[in-house]
Image (spheres, coloured by chain):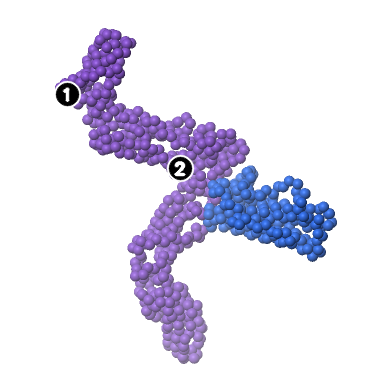
Amino acid sequence: GSLGTPQNLKCVTHNLHKMICTWDVSSRGRYGQTDFCYTANDLTSQVCFKTKERRVEIPVPESSSTVTIKSSGTAFATKEFVIHQKDISFVPVTPHILSLTPDFSTSTLNLKWSDNGSIFPYGLDALWQIQILRKETMEEVTQVTYHSKLTHEDLILSWNWSSDMPLECTSHYVKIRCYINATQFVGPKDWSDWSPAEVVPGKDTEPGGSGVFPLDTVVAVGSDVTFCCVHEEDQHITNMTYGSKPYKMIQLSSRSHAIRVLNASASDTSGTNVVCHLKNGMDGTVVFVGYAPDTPQNLSCETSNFLIIKCTWKPGRPSGLYGDRRTKYSLFERMSGKNVSCEVNEMNRDRACGFPVLPDQKTYDFILGVSNPIGQAQSSLLVDITQRVHPKAPEKLTVIGNNSTSIQMRWFMNGSFAGIRLLCQIEVSSGHSERKLHNVSMPGGKSSTYTAQMNALRPYTKYQFRVRCSAADHFWRWSDWSRGVEQATA
Amino acid sequence: MAAADSPSTALRRRDLCSRGIRLAGKMRADVIDLLDAYVERQGLDASASVAAVEGVPLAAVERWDEQTGTQRLLENLAAYRAFRTLLAQMLEEQREQLGEADAGLGRALAAVLLQVSAFTYHLEELLRLESRGIPGEEEDGPPPPPRLSIFEQKLRGLGVLRELAQWAVRSTRDLRQLAKPSSATGTAPGLTESP
């Protein structure tokens, strides 16, 4: 073209409505005013305006647009272009990160950004590439693609990322870009630019910041864990040990080194020390490596007195966690909504928990919840406690009368058995003769005494008696035997 | 000038001192045993050097020879009161961290705490003997220590037990010094008026 002819017209749209067209001129001419005119296929008249820039924003045509550029540089040169939609590239606007929030306790980053959906038609698929970088050298840690659908509204999208290393160890950076699958748009489509990087500064950037991280954490056996030692500017790290074993160090920055422990094994009761040995002094942290609680086995509940229901279970594999981190148990009853936390001694094998008998409630729908910092489990049991009566041993068995062939006796039962019938068994023995068992049943009472009479006994004979009781209907378990008494017939 | 002891006071002091020396000796043996168990149970390195721990009284003292008897008693008393608080804190942390998991270590710690309390009372007896007012304990005791990490708690425990073992040695020497008849040594730093 003649001197100063406009050329290389390129148009890019960021929002499918407007496009930015740029051009240059064939030679270095004086930079003058330009007359820019365009017609879109659906517009009858031409739109013209003057501009000093070689950049204009005009509507995106349905199919094509005719553009006339008359530049008045060294000479008047006019060039006409026909822009088809297929020639226009679609590059979405660079996403804007709204917030990057660290949760140091879980080493998680939460990213929030706006999807700018309002400028796009409803229902377009959007892809978001999120890049995580780390260290002073901003090395890429991972790049993840997140999918969403635009809804013609500006939605705030949120995404979490769990770091394999405590966030305190070194600075973490996040960048994001997007790609919008505008199926109706026939021009070339491309990823947006990367957003500026948002940063969560590490402790190694804090003046005087130091420490070994994660601090006093709990992890599951078999975990891979990264520990880091952040030290002050004037310090020098010599080595890092896990338990008593030195580990190869990975430098994160001038003030931060890490070690990577693979397949961690269960720690002692006081935890495993992770020690950072420095030129003068040391720092450290403790990690507790244990197991999530097993599902409680053989959950069983009974009552001895209709005042307290006692549930027992087998805990399964010990968690290896103690003190504040021990496995905790709670008993929840679904019908009443009542919840009881259980005091359990982690050192003994048997586990038991008491739950109050509730007025006018026979059936209990229990959920035994078990949890520790690593995990949780539960077992459930539906039980009618009138069918789970296991009384305490009868007390104060006393002879209250006797004659030559019969003996009356009395005993005391602790508990409220008013709602059921009791079945009691009296064992009678004398000398070397065979022990005989006599069953007697009676209505239950509330912390009452009960009596029975043994007949058809031999005169002038010394007998030993003891008694045990259970529920007459729906037998569950005998109580223990009472203490024995001895009585001779007259 | 120090008033000469009455024979009964001197006798009483020597008795208290000799019982104190035996108590300090037993305490030191138990602290050493506890220290070994503590290092092993806490997964620490026995040779680890531990920086001076805030609130732990140092046994080392300059010009030990020049101390008066009263100074010896008062410094010992202040130290063992501090150890009583520190050991009680360790016991609390032990329960918090381990629950019933390491009852043995807990019992050993409680036993040493008992001995420290007994020794503290013993020192107060000695001060009473000299009709020397017993300094009251700070009303609500020392300010609670800052919340330490678990590793820092372990190191502090190591520091406390090591220093307590040193104090048991020093107390034995102090009590031997106090047991000497003050008249015999003239300027001997028995229980003279503090300068």
Which residue corresponds to the image point at 54% horizontal and 47% vertical from the top-left? B149
Along the line of sight, the residue nearer the viewer: A474 or A22: A22
- Amino acid at circle 2: Phe
Which residue is pictured at 28% across the width and 32% down the height?
Answer: A180
Q: Is residue A213 at least partly visible in the picture?
A: yes
Q: Secondary structure at mark 1?
A: loop
Closer to the camera in the image, A20 or A157: A20
Q: Residue A2: x percent and y percent?
A: 26, 8
Left or right: residue A152 versus residue B75 is left
Q: Nearer the viewer, residue A476 or A325?
A: A325
Residue B176 is at least partly visible in this image: no
Taking the image as shown, residue B172 lies to the left or right of residue A408, namely: right
Q: Position of residue A438 (x, y in %)?
A: 41, 81
The numbered mark 2 sits on a residue in which chain?
Answer: A
Helix, strand or loop at label 2? It is: loop
Residue at left offset 40%, top offset 54%? A377
Which chain is blue in the rendering? Answer: B
Chain letter of mark 1 equals: A
Which mark, residue A43?
Answer: 1
As measured in the structure, the alpha-carbon distance from the residue carrying label 2 to the one carrying label 1 is 58 Å
**Which quadrant of the figure has residue B130?**
bottom right
2 vs 1, front mark: 1
**Tag 2 and tag 1 share a subunit:** yes
Task: Determine the residue positioned at 64% across, 53% down.
Answer: B82
- Mark 2 Cα-neighbour bin, 10 Å: few <14, some 14–19, many ≥20: few
Which residue type carries mark 1?
Answer: Leu
* Colour of the chain lettered A: purple
